[in-house]
Image (cartoon, helix red, strand yellow):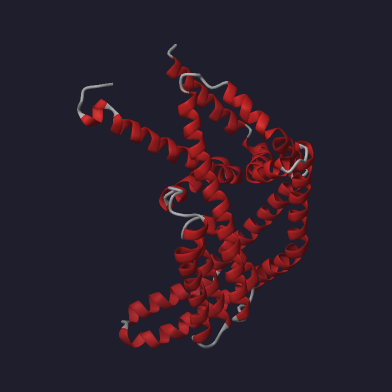
Amino acid sequence: MPKQLWLIVGAILFLAFLWGVSEILFPFVAGLALAYLLDPAVDWMERKGMPRWAAATVMTICAVLAVVGVLLLLAPMLYHQLIGLVDRAPDYIEELRDGAISLLARLQESLSAEQSAALKQKVQNLAGPDSLKWLGGVVKGLWGGGLAIVNLLSLLVITPIVLFYMLRDWDRIVASVDGLLPRDYAKTIREVVREIDRVLAGFVRGQLTVCIVLGIFYAIGLILVGLEFGLIIGLLTGLISFVPYFGMLIGFALGIAVAIAQFDGWLPILIVAAIFAAGQIIEGNFVTPKVVGDQVGLHPAWMIFALMAGGTLFGFTGVLLAVPVAAVVGVLSRFAAARYRESGTFTGGGGT
């Protein structure tokens, strides 16, 4: 069997294996991702004279304490806001329905009797069985998500263990893999891997910073304007901002809906909209160019597709794997395109 065919078969078997163990894969993927992010810090501590195992221990403890600290500080507040938001959802729907009916009354003069009756019926249905069914689906989803979070927290017992051993043995693992590379292509493979590391590190570490900055900005802005549940809406918007445009649109829609239901005048609603607009301006013109940079080379459309495909295939684990897979495919695609442009097929030289 040709070696290329062996590689294809091996890749298919590996994907099938990931599919089969996807339900238990999350703590290991999380540990690997954290190890990748924290390895430079461990390397720095090692260069300062600290043994590798001690540096790995310190970073693991710091990571666990950071996660636990965030949960202890924010989890109760976010939990109460989330429960409050779910409890107030029927009231918001009712208020939005009343506002829409009031607006409909103003439009009746320009509509025929049939059009007015049909539109009024659709608006009234917002507070009817369909909306209650939708609300029940939301609550069910939140409950299922809550159970999923409990399961993830229980798996955090595994993640720190994986994190420690990956940090301790990272350089040894890299050296072992490097020793298995075919000697004729080792130099090329190392160059490609270095480019993947540059792209992946630049995007993940930079985008994480962007999400934190945006979450804090949106949360503070919405709290200052007096928006109900502004903390959770702002932090949620920042958290999902790693999905280009999608995160901001979700937060914007949710924030505007709550603002319309909460405030009587248009000024607070316009201020809420201005906060989201300002966040996008700050991110697009200052934060992302400075932190992530244009050299990363991960197109927003490609990132959205990768995240959706990963989530569909492997759930939340797939979302974690989507970014590194997208980075790898992007770098390999550019490498293949560069080799193609150097080949005789492209130049017309008739070479190989």
Residue 182 x %, y %: 51, 19
Q: Is residue 257 above or below residue 249?
A: below
Number of numbered discs overlaid on the protein picture: 0
Residue 334 x %, y %: 38, 38
Q: Nearer the viewer, residue 343 or 237?
A: 343
Q: Residue at x 76, y 51 (%)?
A: 62
Residue 245 x %, y %: 46, 60
- Direction front: furthest residue: 48
Q: Nearer the viewer, residue 122 or 142?
A: 142
* Viewport quadrant of the C terminus: top left
Q: Is residue 179 above or below residue 290?
A: above
* Viewport quadrant of the N terminus: top left
Q: Residue at x 54, y 55 (%)?
A: 207
Residue 45 x %, y %: 72, 44
Whether residue 133 is visible, yes or no, is: no
- Left/right placement of residue 126 relative to residue 72 reads left
Residue 344 in which image quadrant: top left
Q: Residue at x 59, y 32 (%)?
A: 18
Q: Residue at x 77, y 55 (%)?
A: 68
- Left/right placement of residue 182 relative to residue 169 reads left
Residue 109 in which image quadrant: bottom left
Q: Is residue 317 above or below residue 217?
A: above
Q: Nearer the viewer, residue 80 or 143?
A: 80
Whether residue 186 is visible, yes or no, is: yes
